[in-house]
Image (cartoon, rainbow, N blue to C red):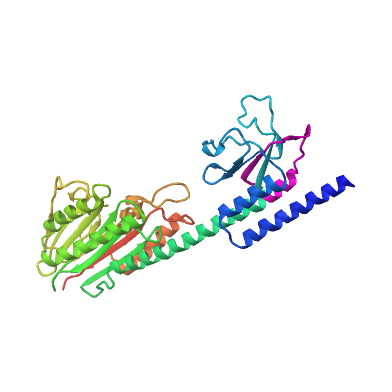
């Protein structure tokens, strides 16, 4: 009867402990309080006097430690130190085992993922080794660890939701930086498409009307991704529009842009940049390519040109080591196609890139299509080439066609 009464009391204590822990979890107590209740339950109620609880939180950390000679909380344990997959007796004869002062290890897992380990010691009382109810220890620990993991997951979700809201705001702000309306008439037709790889990206294009007869068109690609690239891109946009109001001298604009980007980026980021200014009355086209993918320049009756002359990337050197402005005169009709490297670096399922050769061939085969039709056909061809694969980078297309007045 005494043994039965003792077993009854133990089971009642275990059930009361489970109820207390569950109520603490439901009351949304902080992790520290839950661990304290767990500590008290095992040490005081169940008379366990040697324990170490290791929990994986980016690395294995000892959350509770009592009754041991080693202060486990001060040690850094390698990720491969735990090899136990079920409740196991510690081999006291294995001198390489750093957990020799314990007698048992109880792994805690959920859906096949190991979350924690409980190391226990069987202390002797009245000459007899105390029996530990490892099933209860495992159950109680599982409840505690899973509840704490759920708390962590909830916090991560809240942080992610906040980040998503911030990224969406940044995306909306970035969208406002692109020109809202592009001219599309009989004499000038400008078309653009932008496909960001992430919510926000580092590609940029613009069309700036300098005067009634003169405009600037440009495309750029900022190194890096995400918010830092978007911020640098916004600096470029603001600086360029300010400079375009002050001068129509392209070389001066590029020199000033490089100076400002170098100061802002501190040499850590750079920008590939192409810009051209066209005067419709003088039929004069001048451009500078600062390390960007060479745009395609098509004039009726002439071979296709690659506009690759100019300077090195912006923001890497101050001043620019070389800067060359190319001027083309007597150009009354032309098609200019600009793009970022995400277009030609599109991969298919065989790992092959679309490449600049396929892009040049596409335009040579379709010399008379207007910008709307060009973009539509090119996007169809790119999608067919990559099939189910996603873009690996931001992709921007910008086409400008000029017809004689």
* Residue 241, position as x, y percentages in the image: 19, 65
Residue 114 lies in the magenta stretch:
yes
Image: 15 above or below 246: above
Q: Which residue is at 29% across, 55% downward? A: 221
Question: In the rendered picture of this protein, how many numbered marks are placed on residues?
Answer: 0
144 relative to 404 in the view: left or right: right
Q: Please tell me which residue lies in front, 141 or 273.
A: 141
202 relative to 134 in the view: left or right: left
Image: 105 above or below 364: above
Q: Which quarter of the figure has residue 213? A: bottom left
200 relative to 119 in the view: left or right: left
Q: Which quarter of the figure has residue 60? A: top right
Q: In this orientation, does residue 65 appear?
A: yes
Q: Please tell me which residue lies in front, 215 or 335.
A: 215
387 relative to 337 in the view: left or right: right
Residue 185 lies in the magenta stretch:
no
**On the rendered image, what quadrant is the C terminus found in?**
bottom left
Q: Which residues are magenta?
A: 112-140
Q: In this orientation, does residue 338 appear?
A: no
Q: Please tell me which residue lies in front, 304 or 338.
A: 338
The residue most toward the front is 126
* Residue 137, position as x, y percentages in the image: 70, 46
* Residue 105, position as x, y percentages in the image: 68, 38
* Residue 92, position as x, y percentages in the image: 68, 27
Q: Which residue is at 47% across, 63% downward? A: 161
């Amino acid at each position: 009867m005494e043994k039965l009464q003792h077993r009854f009391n133990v089971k009642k204590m275990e059930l009361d402990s489970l109820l207390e822990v569950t109520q603490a979890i439901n009351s949304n107590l902080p992790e520290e309080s839950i661990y304290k209740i767990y500590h008290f339950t095992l040490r005081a109620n169940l008379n366990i006097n040697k324990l170490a609880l290791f929990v994986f939180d980016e690395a294995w950390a000892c959350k509770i430690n009592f009754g041991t000679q080693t202060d486990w909380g001060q040690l850094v344990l390698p990720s491969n130190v735990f090899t136990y997959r079920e409740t196991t007796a510690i081999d006291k004869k294995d001198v390489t085992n750093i957990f020799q002062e314990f007698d048992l290890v109880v792994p805690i897992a959920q859906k096949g993922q190991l979350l924690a380990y409980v190391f226990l010691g069987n202390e002797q009382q009245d000459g007899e080794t105390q029996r530990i109810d490892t099933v209860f220890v495992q159950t109680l620990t599982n409840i505690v660890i899973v509840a704490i993991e759920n708390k962590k997951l909830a916090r991560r979700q809240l942080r992610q939701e906040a980040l998503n809201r911030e990224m969406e705001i940044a995306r909306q702000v970035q969208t406002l930086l692109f020109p809202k309306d592009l001219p599309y008439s009989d004499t000038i037709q400008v078309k653009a498409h932008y496909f960001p790889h992430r919510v926000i990206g580092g590609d940029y294009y613009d069309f700036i009307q300098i005067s009634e007869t003169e405009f600037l068109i440009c495309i750029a690609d900022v190194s890096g991704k995400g918010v830092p690239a978007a911020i640098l891109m916004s600096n470029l946009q603001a600086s360029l529009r300010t400079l375009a109001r002050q001068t129509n001298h392209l070389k001066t604009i590029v020199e000033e842009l490089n100076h400002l980007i170098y100061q802002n980026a501190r040499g850590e980021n750079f920008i590939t940049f192409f810009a051209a200014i066209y005067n419709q009355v003088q039929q004069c086209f001048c451009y500078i390519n600062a390390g960007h993918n060479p745009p395609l320049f098509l004039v009726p009756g002439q071979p296709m040109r690659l506009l690759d002359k100019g300077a090195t990337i912006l923001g890497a050197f101050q001043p620019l080591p070389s800067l060359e402005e190319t001027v083309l005169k007597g150009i009354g009709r032309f098609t200019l196609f600009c793009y970022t490297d995400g277009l030609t670096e599109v991969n298919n399922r065989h790992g092959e890139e679309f490449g600049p050769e396929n892009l040049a061939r596409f335009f040579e085969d379709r010399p008379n299509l207007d910008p709307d039709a060009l973009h539509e056909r090119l996007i169809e061809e790119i999608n067919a080439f990559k099939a189910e694969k996603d873009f690996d980078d931001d992709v921007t297309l910008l086409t400008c066609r000029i017809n004689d007045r």
